[in-house]
Image: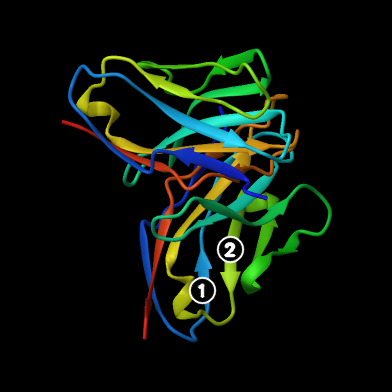
């Protein structure tokens, strides 16, 4: 069965520091992968997606993610974190059927130190 | 363009009461989804719909029902509310792709 693991429940970084959030997936074929962000009290917003092609994908708000098939990973990165990036981040994989369902990881909460 | 709207934003129910969470989208999306979000658990799919008149169970459907009589609306019905249904509920829609658009959520407490 498909699954997504986000091993870090919380991460704290200082403003201006770089960020990497980890995501590992379980899926036999080439997956469709996503990162969503949820600001406090808000719904989820799509940051970026990977379907095929270039393994380094750019998203909104200066985020990028790299698909590594050999490691079954799709880690999210940002070179310099801003205080407004404090939020919860969810990695997701698209279900392997025609429903366009998403299977979400449990999320990583990012805290930003001034 | 309102996107996906959900009502109410907050609700407190007593055990055994029933209620309907409303979800409406104005993007003419065929696909709609209901999720619940519990702390530390990510989002779990309750029900989904691939078009008007078609619904199917997700990962955690017990205690819930849905209907999809129009493209725009996808209400979620809770019958006989239980404390285990205390959660934040999100509705989402998709234009026949994996990119889902989420509503702001409904925070439900059952006591």
Image location (x, y in percent) of residue B96? 75, 33
Is residue A61 in sight in this rendering? Answer: yes
State whether residue B76 is above or below residue A5. above
Query: Would you identify the image quadrant in which residue A1 lies?
Result: top right
Q: Position of residue B25 (x, y in %)?
A: 62, 37
Question: Label 1 to label 2, Cα distance in Å?
Answer: 8 Å
The residue located at (48%, 84%) in the rendering is A17
Q: Relative to B48, is A85 on the left or the right?
A: left
- Packing grade of label 2 (10 A; few <14, some 14-19, many >=20) is many
Residue annotated with mark 1: A19
Q: Position of residue B76 (x, y in %)?
A: 45, 24
Can residue A63 be spotted in the picture?
A: no
Q: Nearer the viewer, residue B13 or A33?
A: B13
User: Which residue is tagged 2?
Assistant: A76
Which residue is drawn at the image coordinates 32% and 15% (left, top)? B79
Q: Is residue B37 above or below residue A47?
A: above
Left or right relative to B10: residue A56: right
Judge by depth and name the residue closer to the eye, B24 or A32: B24
Secondary element under disc 2, as helix, strand or loop, is strand
Q: Residue at x 81, y 59 (%)?
A: A54
> What chain does badge 2 belong to?
A
Q: Decide: marks 1, 2 in contact (CB < 8 A)?
A: yes
């Amino acid at each position: 069965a498909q699954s997504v693991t986000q091993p870090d429940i919380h991460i704290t970084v200082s403003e201006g520091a770089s960020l990497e959030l980890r995501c590992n997936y379980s899926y036999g074929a080439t997956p469709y992968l996503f990162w969503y962000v949820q600001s406090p009290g808000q719904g989820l917003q799509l940051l970026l997606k990977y379907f095929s092609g270039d393994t380094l994908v750019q998203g909104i708000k200066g985020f990028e993610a790299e698909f590594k098939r050999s490691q079954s990973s799709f880690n999210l990165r940002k070179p310099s974190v801003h205080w407004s990036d404090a939020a919860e981040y969810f990695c997701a994989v698209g279900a392997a059927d025609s429903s366009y369902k998403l299977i979400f990881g449990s999320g990583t909460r990012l805290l930003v130190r001034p | 363009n309102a996107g996906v709207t959900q009502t109410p934003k907050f609700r407190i129910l007593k055990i055994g009461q029933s209620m309907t969470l409303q979800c409406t989208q104005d993007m003419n999306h065929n696909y709609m989804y209901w999720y619940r979000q519990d702390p530390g658990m990510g989002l779990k799919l309750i029900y989904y719909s691939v078009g008007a008149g078609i619904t199917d169970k997700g990962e955690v459907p017990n205690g819930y029902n849905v209907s999809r009589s129009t493209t725009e609306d996808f209400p979620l019905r809770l019958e006989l509310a239980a404390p285990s249904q205390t959660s934040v509920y999100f509705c989402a829609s998709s234009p026949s792709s994996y990119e889902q658009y989420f509503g702001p959520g409904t925070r439900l407490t059952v006591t």
